[in-house]
């Protein structure tokens, strides 16, 4: 297939593009490469897929030197004219939209960015999918949409209408916008509610990255809600395997959908929502303990109260995705943390010549 992947300078987008390229798909990747976190890491991801940093200019297609089936274009989703030109030129079979403004706490102080990127940018993707007859749109939602829900594990078949951050609200809005386009214009759409994705090449604003960096530098880590937190940490390889299965299987109408008892996860339109997590939450202190074992460093912990926009626990019910697409995450937290720390030490040359990873606009780890 010819697939557009947005956000390929980002964590999940980089890994997804590599997996699709390895199996022989033609991939066009786009990313605006904003400075929410260290752009050097974003360019390094692109370099790892054969995209030369020196060749990157806005709206200019750059061919990979290592993957003849990969083209990268620096592009902002808000640039509707260039986005339409991209769709018109390449005639995609499917689109996976992973480009978004991430971060729960950042949305408390920079709300406008989320409306621009996550709402207006996503609208432009939907419009292009509509007008260029895209066979399937898969897109990133988030476990954050569950908000005030306390029923565990979280299931897509329950209503999730009480977000506690603008980031979560923007992701819920994406799902509703997608349903509208599936209903009105027959665009097959699948929303993926990601649960705390981690692994090599991960985001510097996520807990594992921040904890590892601080511990290796001998600095204390901030532990929120006094450590009384649980997260459904999900390793990147399992996430990507699930995304690929989704891309390959376009959403179809649920012929048994009942308007009297509507299922939020499906519709009479070609629309669906999946949780994509591990289904096995880990306490934050146990997660820190695993990092301590892998680094042989005892963390200096500063215990703090719950932050605005956070929730105490997440846990994914992945039976819907498993039942439809045989999704079975396999990677343990022990293995995943080990692989991340090995990557981190190699990438930042720990023990050789340490290179300080600059982190822009990041104050606290994002767990959601």
Image (cartoon, rainbow, N blue to C red):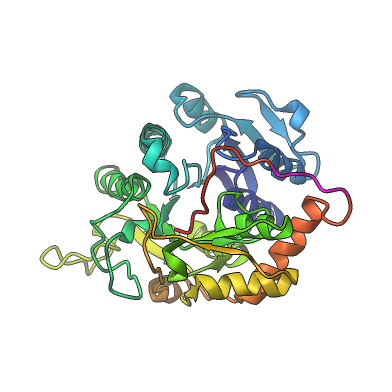
Q: Is residue 119 left or right of residue 159?
A: right
Based on the picture, tell me whether residue 119 belongs to the magenta stretch.
no
Q: Is residue 331 visible?
A: no
Q: Main secondary structure of the magenta part?
A: loop
Within the image, what quadrant is residue 52 found in?
A: top right
**x then y, percent, for residue 319:** 40, 76
Q: Is residue 93 left or right of residue 23?
A: left
Indicate whether 35 appears above or below 309.
above
Q: Is residue 249 left or right of residue 220?
A: left
Front in this rendered view, residue 294 or 121: 294
Q: Which residues are magenta?
A: 353-357
| Quadrant (top left, top right, bottom left, bottom right) of the C terminus | bottom left
Indicate whether 68 appears above or below 278.
above
Residue at 54% x, 38% y is 361
Indicate whether 313 appears above or below 59.
below
Q: Is residue 285 visible?
A: yes
**x then y, percent, for residue 239:** 55, 63
């Amino acid at each position: 297939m010819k697939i557009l992947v947005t956000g390929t300078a980002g964590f999940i987008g980089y890994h997804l593009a590599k997996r699709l390229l390895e199996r022989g798909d033609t991939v066009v990747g786009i990313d605006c490469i904003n400075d929410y976190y260290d752009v050097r890491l974003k360019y390094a991801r692109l370099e790892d897929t054969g995209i030369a940093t020196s060749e990157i200019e806005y709206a200019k297609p750059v061919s990979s030197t290592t993957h003849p089936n990969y083209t990268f274009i620096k592009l902002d989703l808000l640039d509707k004219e260039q986005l339409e030109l991209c769709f018109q030129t390449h005639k995609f079979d499917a689109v996976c939209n992973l480009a978004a403004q991430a971060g729960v706490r950042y949305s408390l102080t920079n709300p406008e960015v989320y409306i621009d990127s996550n709402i207006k940018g996503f609208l432009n993707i939907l419009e292009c999918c509509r007008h260029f007859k895209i066979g399937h749109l898969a897109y990133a939602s988030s476990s954050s949409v569950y908000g005030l829900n306390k029923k565990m594990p979280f299931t897509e078949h329950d209503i999730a209408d009480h977000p506690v951050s603008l980031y979560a609200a923007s992701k819920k809005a994406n799902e509703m916008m997608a349903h509208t386009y599936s209903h009105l214009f027959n665009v097959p759409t699948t929303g993926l509610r990601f649960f705390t994705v981690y692994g090599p090449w991960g985001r510097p604003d996520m807990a594992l990255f921040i904890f590892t960096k601080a511990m290796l530098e001998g600095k204390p880590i901030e532990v929120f809600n006094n450590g009384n937190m649980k997260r459904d940490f999900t390793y990147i390889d399992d996430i990507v395997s699930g995304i690929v299965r989704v891309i390959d299987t376009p959403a179809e109408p649920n012929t048994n959908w009942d308007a009297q008892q509507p299922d939020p996860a499906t519709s009479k339109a070609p629309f669906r929502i999946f949780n994509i997590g591990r289904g096995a939450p880990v306490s934050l202190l146990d997660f820190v303990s695993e990092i301590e074992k892998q680094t042989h460093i005892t963390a200096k912990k500063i215990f703090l109260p719950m932050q605005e926009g956070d929730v105490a626990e997440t846990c994914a019910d992945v039976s819907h995705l498993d039942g439809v697409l045989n999704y079975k995450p396999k990677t343990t937290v022990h293995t995943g943390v080990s692989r991340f720390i090995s990557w981190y030490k190699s990438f930042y040359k720990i023990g050789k010549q340490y290179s300080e990873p600059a982190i822009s606009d990041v104050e606290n780890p994002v767990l959601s």
